Image (spheres, rainbow, N blue to C red):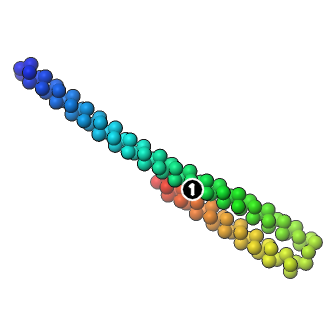
Amino acid sequence: MPPFLRLIFLLAIILSIAVYVTLRIEELEGQVTELQSQNEDIHSTLSDAESEVSTLKSAVDDLNSAIGEFQYTDWRDVVPTVQSAASEIESAADNIKSSVSEAVSASN
């Protein structure tokens, strides 16, 4: 093979490799961007869940306080407060479950 053809062949191979590497880099950068977006979504969802945990703790404190009132207050006056606190706990637990499910879905 003449040297001129070898040089053209070598340049064609180098150009092909350069194009492949450039395309692969662009593909990987796109994947990184997508993963960063997913990570932000997961972080946001887990932050929501963390907030719901605080709400749950507050509701548990309210329930404990209401239960403590049974010692000093007529039970008929305390039951609605206990029911309300129990409802808040159930709602907060459902919200936490939902937030965690969203985070799991975002991670897939």
Q: Amino acid at mark 1?
A: Thr
Query: Which residue is disc 1 drawn over?
Result: 45
User: Where 50 sits versus 83, above or below?
Assistant: above
Residue 85 on image: x %, y %: 76, 70
Q: List the single residue furthest toward the bottom.
A: 76
Tell me where residue 86 sits by quadrant: bottom right
So how many labels did they put on this image?
1
Residue 88 on image: x %, y %: 71, 69
Q: List the single residue furthest toward the top.
A: 3
Residue in the image at 29% along x and 36% along y: 22
Q: Is residue 82 left or right of residue 14?
A: right
Residue in the image at 68% along x and 69% along y: 90
Query: How dense is the environment of label 1, judged by Cα within 10 Å: few (below 14), some, or many (20 and up)?
Result: many
* Quarter occupied by the N terminus: top left
Q: Is residue 48 left or right of residue 62?
A: left
Q: List the single residue furthest toward the left.
A: 2
Tell me where residue 18 sits by quadrant: top left
User: Where 10 sits versus 52, above or below?
Assistant: above
Residue in the image at 34% along x and 38% along y: 25
User: Where 33 sits versus 18, above or below?
Assistant: below
Residue in the image at 53% along x and 59% along y: 102
Q: Is residue 103 left or right of residue 28?
A: right
For mark 1, give the secondary structure. helix
Residue 15 on image: x %, y %: 21, 31
Residue 57 on image: x %, y %: 74, 59
